[in-house]
Image (spheres, rainbow, N blue to C red):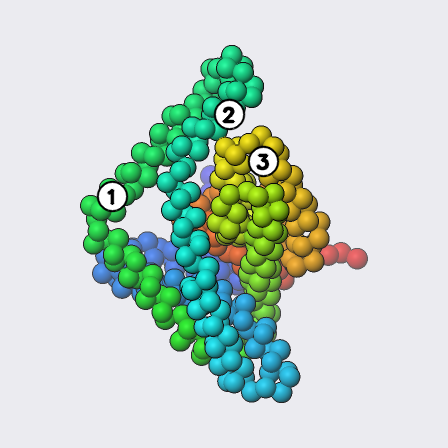
């Protein structure tokens, strides 16, 4: 039996002239090259070192840029030269930092050291309070059913902290190196930020100049949408986190909760992570309130509930809006996955990174639909 012969013109029409097949072949060749070159250490090692060196300064600069650029644009629209507005903003920020160092940092340091020192005793006191509130028999049954033992949990935390301190002492050189790299990254940020604020509007045109003319319009559209997603998320999330911290601080002061400033700061910083951050932030506040008294615990829960309602119903809808258009369940899974892959940095960058990838994927899919001809609509 003779197999049917594939004519050259048919092969050319199905494969060589098919742009989608050529696109897949190109991706395959690029992937094979990366795979082979990755086996040679000296090929990608300089690139990896470069990325690790500039990644932290670029991330910090980007966050600060998206916060300050609207202010600089506003001052420029008020007939103030851009360079003068940037210098004025730098002087204001320097004054605020100086005020924080002189007035706020000592108070925060005192509360942090006192809270860390008293945390094991607080945890044990919480256990004793719960036992007295609900009865020893019921508490023992809960422990046997769930397998949860607060003493073991406290001991585990203490051991983790001790091992971390021992590890830091054993590898003091690595620890000092990490601190040095972080301080250098922070020190570089003002210089990069200055030029980015001054000439950042020229950056898209400079990037587009390397691309063919046929790709520039769509690439500019993708870059504009990515910039809108990132800027909206960063500014909105930081403003929302600041509002949560401020409202909790006022509420904690009203009810007289100890360590109100540091607990509010913890809540503000952890609220940068959507949905999971508030759940983490409430834990130390619950412990401190439970140690104080059952009435204080009830007051703290009421304050927390009121702040979360205000944030969910009024603050976030006004500031964040619906720009990201990401389902909350998707956000939680993205944060958990990024945390397992990249640690703390992955948790912080999970949502904006997903938003950027979503923009790129949607535009690639639109391009594929137009070029493949498989999604033609029939009228």
Which numbered mark, 1 or 2, is in the foreground of this view? 2
User: Residue 3's spot in the image, x, y percent?
Assistant: 47, 44
Q: Residue at x 35, y 65 (%)?
A: 185
Q: Residue at x 39, y 42 (%)?
A: 116
Residue 194 visible to the viewer: yes
Question: From mark 2 to mark 3, how far is it between C-alphas?
Answer: 13 Å
Q: Nearer the viewer, residue 33 or 313?
A: 313
Q: Is residue 372 above or below residue 79?
A: above
Q: Nearer the viewer, residue 233 or 44?
A: 233
Tell me the residue that label 2 is attached to.
Answer: 129
Q: Residue at x 32, y 54 (%)?
A: 35
Q: Label 2: few (<14), some or many (≥20) within 10 Å? A: some
Please report whichever mark, 1 or 3, sits nearer to the chain's N-terminal start: 1
Q: Label 3: few (<14), some or many (≥20) within 10 Å? A: some
- In the displayed orientation, state which residue is furthest to the top: 137
Q: Residue at x 62, y 38 (%)?
A: 299
Name the mark on residue 296. Answer: 3
Q: Is residue 183 left or right of residue 135?
A: left
Please report whichever mark, 2 or 3, sits nearer to the chain's N-terminal start: 2
Tell me the residue that label 1 is attached to.
Answer: 167
């Amino acid at each position: 039996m003779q197999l049917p012969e594939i004519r050259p013109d048919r092969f050319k029409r199905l494969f060589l002239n098919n742009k989608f097949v050529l696109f897949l072949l190109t991706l395959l060749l690029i992937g094979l090259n990366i795979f082979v070159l990755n086996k040679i250490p000296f090929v990608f090692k300089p690139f990896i070192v470069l990325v690790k060196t500039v990644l932290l300064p670029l991330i910090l600069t980007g966050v600060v840029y998206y916060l300050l650029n609207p202010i600089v644009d506003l001052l420029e629209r008020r007939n103030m030269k851009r360079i003068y507005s940037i210098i004025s903003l730098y002087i204001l920020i320097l004054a605020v930092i100086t005020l924080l160092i002189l007035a706020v940092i000592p108070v925060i340091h005192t509360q942090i050291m006192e809270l860390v020192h008293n945390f094991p005793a607080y945890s044990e006191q919480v256990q004793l309070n719960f036992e007295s509130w609900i009865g020893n028999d019921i508490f023992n049954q809960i422990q046997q059913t769930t397998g949860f033992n607060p003493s073991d949990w406290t001991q585990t935390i203490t051991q983790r902290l001790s091992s971390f301190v021992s590890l830091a002492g054993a590898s003091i050189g690595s620890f000092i190196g990490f601190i040095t790299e972080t301080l250098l990254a922070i020190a570089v940020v003002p210089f990069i930020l200055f030029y980015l604020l001054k000439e950042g509007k020229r950056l898209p045109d400079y990037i587009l100049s390397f691309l063919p003319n046929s790709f520039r319009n769509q690439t500019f559209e993708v870059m504009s949408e990515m910039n809108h997603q990132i800027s909206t998320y960063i500014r909105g999330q930081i403003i929302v986190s600041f509002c949560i911290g401020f409202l909790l601080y006022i509420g904690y002061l009203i009810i007289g909760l100890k360590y109100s400033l540091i607990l509010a700061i913890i809540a503000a910083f952890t609220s940068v992570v959507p949905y999971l951050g508030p759940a983490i932030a409430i834990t130390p506040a619950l412990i401190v309130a439970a140690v104080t008294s059952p009435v204080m615990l009830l007051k703290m829960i009421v304050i927390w509930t009121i702040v979360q309602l205000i944030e969910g119903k009024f603050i976030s809808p006004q500031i964040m809006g619906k720009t990201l258009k990401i389902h909350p369940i998707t956000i939680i899974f993205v944060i958990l996955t990024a945390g397992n892959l990249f640690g703390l940095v992955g948790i912080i960058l999970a949502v904006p990174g997903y938003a950027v990838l979503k923009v790129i994927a949607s535009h690639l899919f639109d391009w594929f639909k137009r070029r493949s001809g498989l999604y033609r609509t029939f009228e």
